[in-house]
Image (spheres, rainbow, N blue to C red):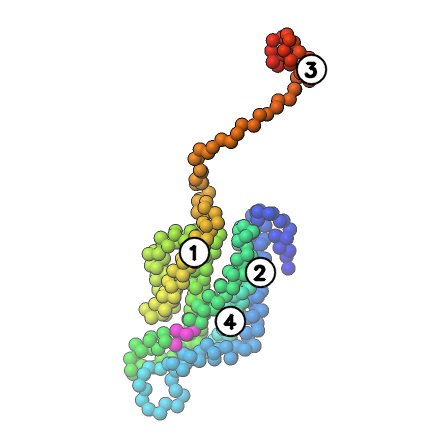
Amino acid sequence: MPKSARKQEKDPEGRMPLAAHLRELRNRLLKSVLAIMVITAVAMWQYEAIAHFVTGPVIDSVGCPKAPTGPRTHPCAQVVANGLLAPFTIMLKVSLTTGVVFSTPVWLYQLWAFLAPGLHRHEKKYALGFVGAGVPLFLGGAYLAYAVLPTTAGALLGLTPSDWANLFPADEFFDIVTRMVLVFGLAFELPLLLVLLNFGGVLTGSRILSWWRFMVLGITVFAALATPTGDPLTMGLLAAPIVVLYFGAVGICLFNDRRRKFGNPDAGLSDDEASELDLTPGEVGAIEPVASGRMLPGQASGEAGDGAAGRRGGYDDFT
């Protein structure tokens, strides 16, 4: 394992040359990929159980019975492996998705560790809070995608004509599952990113709140583009929680700004903005006399000229 650039060169202000930043980024990415690969390898042993866990709710919702006893009353579908290499490809997709999801604590911490040197010493204490909040947010988004998938599949299959049959190619189905899990999980990290920028002093809560119209519109457009199914139900189920989390993050940022301003009145000023100075005149205290020392040679020796102590040739100093 290459030695971390941060162990080679330590700077109290977190400054690093470009080459050291690139080495640090390489090391952080290597650790994240290694954690994903380890969990992916473990998931391959339980590939069949994970595949049944993922497809189970969808099959229960829209799957066709193996032994139909009568005419179908609603559209149904069967999951099929299309092609000789399809089972192997599906195994890789399922295992890799499992590795990304369950290695969330590792790569989130590596992300924080890469950004932490740019923060002040008192701001680095939020590392555990960042990882502690980021993991449940990502897992919550992934679980939401897993929970809404049966409802989404049922709504889409409801458009099938009554005399048609449906087949779910397994590789295409797992592409949709993987994309939804990653998109939902990463989208739930947006509020945490805003809070991180606020705690780092990059954005204020009032600035983030002033963007709420554009943020709501952007979240809606992102949900429409990111959902692989493209139906309004899935789009709304993704956009609504993110909007709620966004306003929750705004509340946390506003509270943090008020707390910071209470401890430091100049905390909200930008780097090129001067702080207010109190220029009110104050009372001058009693004048204290200051004894002047004899610094000239004639004064130091006690000589006097023209009858006045410390004078030479009618002058007070030696010129």
Residue 288, image x and y in percent? 56, 28
As displayed, is residue 311 above or below residue 221? above
Q: Residues within 10 Å of mark 1 (few under 14, many from 20)?
A: few
Between the C-alphas of marks 4 and 3, the distance is 95 Å
Between the C-alphas of marks 2 and 3, the distance is 81 Å
Q: What stretch of residues is rendered in magenta?
A: 146-150
Find disc 4 in the rendering and name its residue: 98
Q: Residue at x 36, y 80 (%)?
A: 166
Tag 3 secondary structure? loop
Question: What type is the residue that disc 2 sits on?
Answer: Leu
Viewer-nearest of labels 1 and 4?
1
Mark seen at residue 131: none
Find disc 2 in the rendering and name its residue: 30
Residue 278, image x and y in percent? 44, 38
Q: Residues within 10 Å of mark 4 (few under 14, many from 20)?
A: many
Question: What type is the residue that disc 1 sits on?
Answer: Phe
Question: What type is the residue that disc 3 sits on?
Answer: Gly
Q: Earlier in the sequence, mark 2 or mark 3?
A: 2
Image quarter in which the N terminus is found: bottom right
Number of labelled discs? 4
The answer to whether one can see residue 230 in this image is no
Tag 4 secondary structure? helix
Tag 1 secondary structure? helix
Q: Horizontally, is 311 left or right of 151 in the view?
A: right
Q: Earlier in the sequence, mark 3 or mark 1?
A: 1
